[in-house]
Amino acid sequence: MHYPVVNKNGKIIASAVTNLDLHDISRAAKTYGVRAFYVVTPLADQKELVEKIVAHWLEGTGGTYNPKRKEALKLIVIKNTLAEVIDDIRENTGDAPKTIVTSANQNSRNISFKRFREMLQDGASYLLILGTGWGLSESFIAEADYVLDPVSGNTGYNHLSVRSAAAVMLDRLLGKKD
Amino acid sequence: MHYPVVNKNGKIIASAVTNLDLHDISRAAKTYGVRAFYVVTPLADQKELVEKIVAHWLEGTGGTYNPKRKEALKLIVIKNTLAEVIDDIRENTGDAPKTIVTSANQNSRNISFKRFREMLQDGASYLLILGTGWGLSESFIAEADYVLDPVSGNTGYNHLSVRSAAAVMLDRLLGKKD
C-alpha cells in the first residue's frame, strides 16, 4: 500500500513506488506460493511506472534475459484502492478475503504468527497488507479484520525494509519448518 | 561478497554493489543483533561508492534525517577479500571465525538451519557469507567450513533477492520462535 500511509511526521501521504519493492516482493511471493501481489497507489504517474517496469520483464527484453524474474513479476496487479483489490479477489475466488494488516508497532488486537499460520489452513482467502513509508495510517489499521504481530528480531531495533519484512513474514507463515 | 561470484553463464565475475543491499542487509543485521556487516569487493570504484553511501548516512544529512538508519549503516565494513574480513574479525575477537556459506543449490555438505541455530549458541564467532550475482563460485564454497541449506519456500521456485534471503536467514537463525 502506497496510500494511506504516514510519513516521518505522522502525516498521511501517498508514498512513491520503489522499483526493488516490486522485484523483491514478487520474488518472495512466488517462492512462497502467494497467489497475487497487489500494488496499490492512487497516483497516475506511479501506476504508469509500475506498468512500465512490469511490461519490461513480461513483454520486453527483461523476460528473455531472466525468465525466472518474469514468473515472479507476473503476480503483480496494480489497483487504486484496497476496495478495488477486494473486488478483484471476490471476482476471482467468489468471496471477499479476510484482511490482515502489519505494523511495526504493538497493537492490542495483535495476533501471533503462529495463530495466523494456523488460520491459513482454513481454506479462506487472506489478504496480507503491508504499508510503505512510515507505515499504514491508524484508521486504515483499525478497519482491517486482523492485525499481525510486528516482526521482531532479538534486539530493540525494529526497522526492517518493507522488502525484508515481507520476506520474513512469508517465511514465518508459509516456509518449511526445520 | 561481490567477488568471486558467478554471472548468468557461470563465469566468475566481480558484481556491482547495489545501494539497497547496503540498506536492507544492515537494517536486518541490526534487527537481529549481528556484530558487523562486511561488504567485500576488490573494485576501487565500488568501494568508493559504498564509502560515499555510508558517509552520507553516518556523517551527512542522512543521519540527521533518519538516525535509525545511521545505527544500521554503522555496521558496514568494506574489505577487498574474505581473507581481510577474517583478519579483521581475528583482530577484534582474538579468533578467526568459522565460515558458513549460503547457496541456492543443494550441496552434499549442507547443514540445516536448526543445526546452525544450535551452533550459534557455542560462543564462537561465525561469518555467514552471501553471494551476489548468480551466487558464490564453486571453489569458494568448497573452501568454507560449512554450507547452509538453501532457503526454500513451499514451491519449486527458489529465487529470492540477496536482501530477502539475508533477512529470512537471520530470522530463522536468530529470530524469536513463536
Image (cartoon, coloured by chain):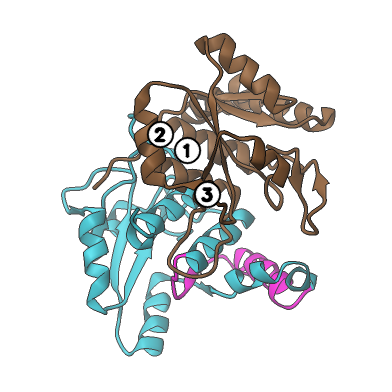
Chain colours: A brown, B cyan
Asked whether the beta carbons under mark 1 and mark 3 sit within 8 Å of each other, the answer is no
The residue to which callout 2 is attached is A32
Residue A132 location, x and y as percent? 67, 45
Q: Is residue A159 left or right of residue B133?
A: right
Mark 3, residue position: A165
Q: Earlier in the sequence, mark 1 or mark 3?
A: 1
Residue closer to the observer: A83 or B111: A83
Identify the residue position indicated by label 1 in the image: A28
Marks 2 & 1, CB-CB < 8 Å contact = yes
Crowding near pointer 3: few (<14 within 10 Å), some, many (20+)?
many
Q: Chain of mark 3?
A: A
Determine the residue positioned at 61% across, 36% down: A22
The kind of residue on which mark 1 rests is Ala
Q: What residue span does the magenta drawing correspond to?
A: B32-60
* Residue B95 magenta: no
Q: Chain of mark 1?
A: A
**Residue located at (34% from left, 55% from top):** B172
Inspect the magenta stretch and tell me whether residue B50 lies in it.
yes
Q: Secondary structure at mark 2?
A: loop
